[in-house]
Amino acid sequence: MPEGPEVYILCEAFKYLDITVEQYGKHLLYKDLDGRCYDITFGLYGKIFVSKTEKGYDIQKTGCSPLTGDIKHIQSFDYVKSKLGVDWISSSKDDLLKVVQEWKVKSKKIAALLLDQHEICGIGVAWGSEILNKAGIHPTELPCNVDIEKLVDAMIYIKNESISIYRNISLYDPVDFANKWFRNLYLVRDMKVYKTGKEVSVSGRTFYTITGNFPACSTNA
C-alpha cells in the first residue's frame, strides 16, 4: 500500500494544479473546491482521479473494495494530525530522535514500533524493511539493543531516497502523472530488500531482511 513517500509525491503533483492537499503519514488531507476537508487513505489498491471542473481541478478517490482504504469528511487537517504520531516525511532528525529514544524502555520489537502510526506515521512494511536493512538491524530486535542514532540516520536516508522522484514531476503533465501515480510508483520504487530478502513475521506482518546484514541479534525471528 502507499506509505508516506508515495502520498508525499502525489501531493507534490497536486501543487502544480493548485489543489489544496497535505500529506501526513499515509494520509492525503484534501480540501475540495467548496472548502470541505477530507481524510483519504489508500489501502492496497486505492487510486486517485483528477478532473477539470468549472471551478478548477478536483480529485476523487476511486475503487470500491475493502482494500482501497477510505475517504472521510473531517473538521480540519489538524484533527487528523492530532490523532497520529510525528510525520516521518516532514520530521527532522531531532524530531525523530526524540520519539525513538523513548523506545529504549519498550518491550515491543523494533519492527512493530516502526509500524505504530501513533509513534511515527508514514512507515509501513515496505519502507520499514528498507530502513532496518539500511541500519543493519533485524526486524525482531528489541529497541534496548538498537543503536538509536543509526536507526534514525537510516530513516532520514531512506526518506530522502524514496521521495527523490518528486523532483521530476514538472517534466510530466501533472494530471496524467497523478492519475497514473499508483501504478507508476510501484514500477519505480528502488527497493533493496522488500519482497527480495528473507521473510520475517513481526506482529502478524511480513518484513523482509537480508541474512548476514546485521549484527547478532538478542532475539530470534
Image (tube, grey):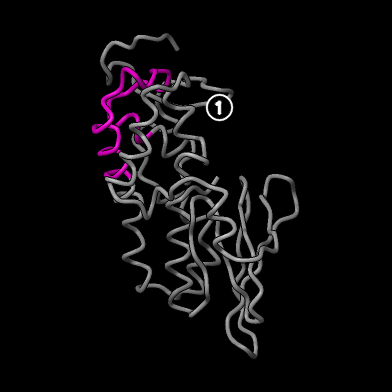
- Label 1 residue SS: strand
- Residue 15: x and y in percent read 44, 74
Between 19 and 73, the residue placed more toward the observer is 73
**Prevalent SS, magenta region:** helix
> Is residue 60 rendered magenta in the image?
no
Name the residue rendered at 68%, 53% in the picture: 70
When the figure is inspected, residue 150 is found, relative to residue 52, above or below; the finding is above
Whether residue 139 is in magenta: the answer is yes
Looking at the image, residue 184 lies above or below residue 137: below
Q: Is residue 14 above or below residue 156?
A: below
Residue 9 appears left or right of 149: right
Amino acid residing under circle 1: Arg
Rendered image quadrant of residue 51: bottom right
Locate the N terminus by quadrant.
top right
Q: Position of residue 96 (x, y in %)?
A: 34, 42
Q: What is the count of numbered marks?
A: 1
**Of residues 102 and 51, the one drawn nearer to the viewer in this rendering:** 102
Depth check, front residue: 86 or 159: 86
Q: Where does label 1 land, which residue?
A: 205
Estimate how packed mark 1 is, as few (under 14), some (14 to 19) or many (20 or more) residues with alpha carbons within 10 Å.
few
- Residue 98 at x, y = what percent? 33, 40
Looking at the rendered image, the quarter that the C terminus falls into is top left
Q: Residue at x 74, y 49 (%)?
A: 65
Highlighted range, magenta: 130-158
Q: Residue at x 36, y 62 (%)?
A: 166
Residue under the point 43% across and 60% down: 9
The residue closer to the viewer here, 111 or 207, is 111
Position of 207 with respect to 60 (left or right) is: left
